[in-house]
Image: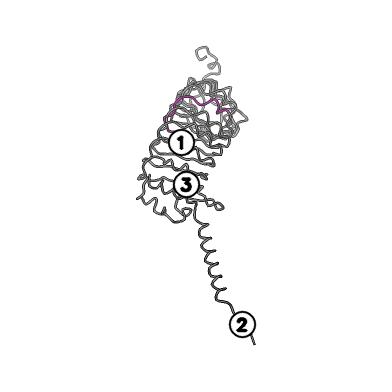
Amino acid sequence: MEIHPKISPLFLFSILISFSFMITLSHTAELCHPSDENALLEIKSRLGPNLSFFDTWRPNTDCCSWINVACDKRTHRVNYLAVGQNRDLSGQIPSVVGQLSHLETLWFNDMPGLTGPIPSALSNLANLKELMLARTNLTGPIPSFLGRLTKLTDLDLSENRLYGPIPGSLSQLSNLQQLKIFKNQLTGSIPESFGSFKKLFFQAYENQLSGPVPRSLVRADFSWVDLSSNQLTGDASVLFGRRKRAAYINLNNNAVSFDLSKVEFPSKLQGLDLSHNVIYGSIPQQLAKLPLKVLNVSYNQLCGPIPTGLTQFGSDAFASNKCLCGAPLAPCKSISLFFHPSFM
């Protein structure tokens, strides 16, 4: 005969209350921090409270589950925010974004309606690793305080209406791997302090940068550098070197001047555009030994025979120089031609 122990109704009630409390506690733990939620709702109110972009951004719901928002799985603090790719969003970057102190990734991109300067509140985001403010109508200078965000690995300020000089403080970003500031209205010279960068992917094309290329860049080791369509002058050979690791160098449409025959090139160089400058000398044989996929040295003052092994780039890549010859251009008439006083 089985004996069933009697269970007290009070005991059952206490078990039920405890279970309900645990469920409530678990649900609460999934919600993002109240201050993060308030900051996000303020961003929504400033940029487009009635837009479908913010449909999931609703009060008293877990903002970690909102579209374009993500949280750290351990702390449940917002560490990722991406606002953009929407022509209807408009206004300025709300300063309240600076209260999202745990952010590691912040994007405001592809928003023609985003105007105004880069707010100083971003200086509070000490944990930021990736900052993209691209393809908007932001104006004003690049703020020097960005140099204090020392965890940054990627900084993209491209395709805006930013003006003024490149702040030298950016060289304090020792972890920086990508710097994209192309298609703005930046002026002045490249900071001397940029000689400290190693392995930096650097794009500053289509600005109004001027002055000589800094000699300090002989110490820099860019993985990719595009300074085309500016007003740079001087000896840009400091960007080259046999021990450097650049895969692509573009100086097209500047006024730099140096003897190409004395340049040693990075052994892994795949793209080189030196067209529309004042570069002289001859084309070194080393170029034919590189894994080049892009080459253009047209519209310079180069002279002498084109090394064999470069014919695949076509005549346009060598056009409008002082006296280049050989395939894919016209044959060289005489070796002595290149030592005639009229070509010196």
Q: Secondary structure at mark 3?
A: strand
Q: Which residue is mark 1?
A: 120
Q: Amino acid at mark 2?
A: His
Q: Looking at this view, name the residue that lies furthest to the front.
A: 10
Q: Does 183 lie within the magenta span?
A: yes
Residue nearest the viewer, comparing 97 with 277:
97
Residue 94 percent coordinates (x, y)? 41, 41
Q: Are marks 2 and 1 in contact (CB under 8 Å)?
A: no
Residue 153 percent coordinates (x, y)? 55, 39
Q: Amino acid at mark 1?
A: Ser
Q: How is the image coloured?
A: one colour
Q: Which residue is mark 2?
A: 4
Q: Does 331 lie within the magenta span?
A: no
Residue at screen point 38% across, 37% down:
115
Q: Secondary structure at mark 1?
A: helix
Q: Start and end of the magenta stretch?
A: 181-195
Q: Which residue is mark 3?
A: 81
